[in-house]
Image (tube, rainbow, N blue to C red):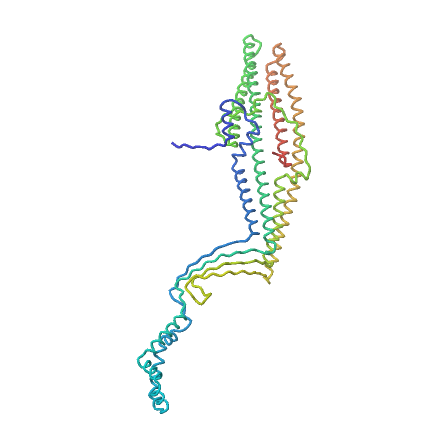
Amino acid sequence: MNIRVKILTPLVLICLTNIALGQSALTLQECRDMALKNNQQSKIAHEKLSAAEYEKKAAFANYLPKISATGAYLHNSENISLISDDQSAALTNLGTNMVTSIGSRLPGLMQDPALANLIQNSPAVQQMIGKLQNGEIATALNEIGSNLASEFEMDIANIYVGAVTVEEPLYAGGKIRAYNKVTAYAKELAEAQMSGEDQKVMVSVDEAYWQIVSIANKLKLTEKYVELLRKLNADVEKMRGEGLATQADQFSVKVKLNDGEMKLVKARNGLALSKMLLCQLCGMDLHTDITLADETNENLTVPADTVIYTQEEIDENRVELKSLRLASEMYNQKVSIVRADYLPTVALLGSYTLTNPSAQNGFQNKFGDMLSFGVVARIPIYHFGEGMNKVNKAKAEARIAQYQLDEARNKITLQVTQYEQRIKEADSRLELASGNMENAEENLRMANIGFKEGYLASTSVLEAQTAWLQAHSEEIDAKIDKIMAIVYLRQATGQLK
């Protein structure tokens, strides 16, 4: 067995509790509030607003320094040597090569009497020659050469690098300022779109709410109409028994009675379906037995609202115009952003670097640090017209947005005029329907009297009852049309709240 758990908002829970306890009926505002909390598009619009707020905060961060840290480790299979292998070998065998060279020349030098006499009479020279012959000097020089050769070889088997960098833009061609304006407009646009979604939800709820009220009132009329037909049917049966009515009269009444009962069934089904639609909009279970505050009113009252507005208020409050106006401003700033890509940029840089090996005091396998700072400038020189063409494209898009704004303003002006005319038509229709209803009431009263007195046939009563039902139905429709016409005009002028 599948069990579905639905999490309800506190407002929905309160309303459902009240319905279950029979404490109160749902008002139009309560239905609106529940629908706004339940509607997925409204939730999406709220999340878009949150995203726009975060984007605005991120754009402002471009004014502030950016700090980043970098670390790296590198292992190399070979080291770097500043001298060749032959040069390294020559330094390593420096003593041996020198002693060999001197030893090969020493017998020839001994042929010189003066030099031979110097060697025989100088103990120091004799001692040096002895060290050459026993390899002591060669060993010492080889060690010195080996140490010198190793100094020319850099140990880079393991390299460690770390750096902290700070970058502060000084001038970016106006891109940062323009981007901040774009994100501010984007936030206002998200707010406008959220308001637009809320208004759509409210109109949908109003339509469903007043449809239920209309059907409920017509259901009451139909029930009363069926009662009248049943009473007339009983009267005709008695009169037929007394020979005062024909079988055709009774058939006519029964046909009308069956038709009335069919209308009653349809009205009840229509009311149930309409309530299911409102429950779906409000986020309630479709089979919740709800009752509306205006549904139980004996006489539906039309609010005497007068929608007062100016063209400036429409431009300011109408969601579509506000959205297009903000879009136009965003495209204007986009021109500045595109242009900034082809203007000079200047940034201040600073960094702290730590490396191993370090070359600050010779090449050493230990950590060494360094602090550096400076200014970096980038100056575009020539891009074969790329920048100019991109700027012109951005300007064309800005003009398109302005044209769309002008077109929408004209259409909305026409829409407002149409809804004003619709209110006037609803007023005229309501006035005529009220007059017709009074006439139908009087006509039905006179028909009933004439039928009882015997000078009117049952068909006259049927016609009077049908006219009475139609007149009442038309009055209900006229009232609902007037109410919804006011709602539509408020939406068109941006005053629906």
Q: Is residue 444 left or right of residue 20?
A: right
Tell me the residue at 48%/32% (across/down): 8
Tell me the residue at 42%/60% (across/down): 160
Q: Quadrant of the N terminus?
A: top left
User: Based on the displayed image, in which of its 4 quarters is residue 454 positioned?
Assistant: top right
Q: Residue furthest bottom?
A: 113
- Residue 336 placement (x, y as % from top left): 61, 53
- Asked if 275 appears above or below 234 in the picture, the reply is below
Q: Quadrant of the C terminus?
A: top right
The front one of 186 and 265 is: 186
Tell me the residue at 40%/70% (across/down): 151
- Residue 486 placement (x, y as % from top left): 64, 31
- Asked if 470 appears above or below 138 in the picture, the reply is above
The front one of 330 and 362 is: 362
- Residue 206 placement (x, y as % from top left): 58, 31
- Asked if 79 appears above or below 338 in the picture, the reply is below
Q: Is residue 407 left or right of residue 111?
A: right
User: Based on the displayed image, in which of its 4 quarters is residue 244 positioned?
Assistant: top right
Tell me the residue at 65%/34% (across/down): 419
Q: How many marks?
A: 0
Q: Residue furthest left?
A: 134
Q: Is residue 126 left or right of residue 367?
A: left
- Residue 105 placement (x, y as % from top left): 35, 86
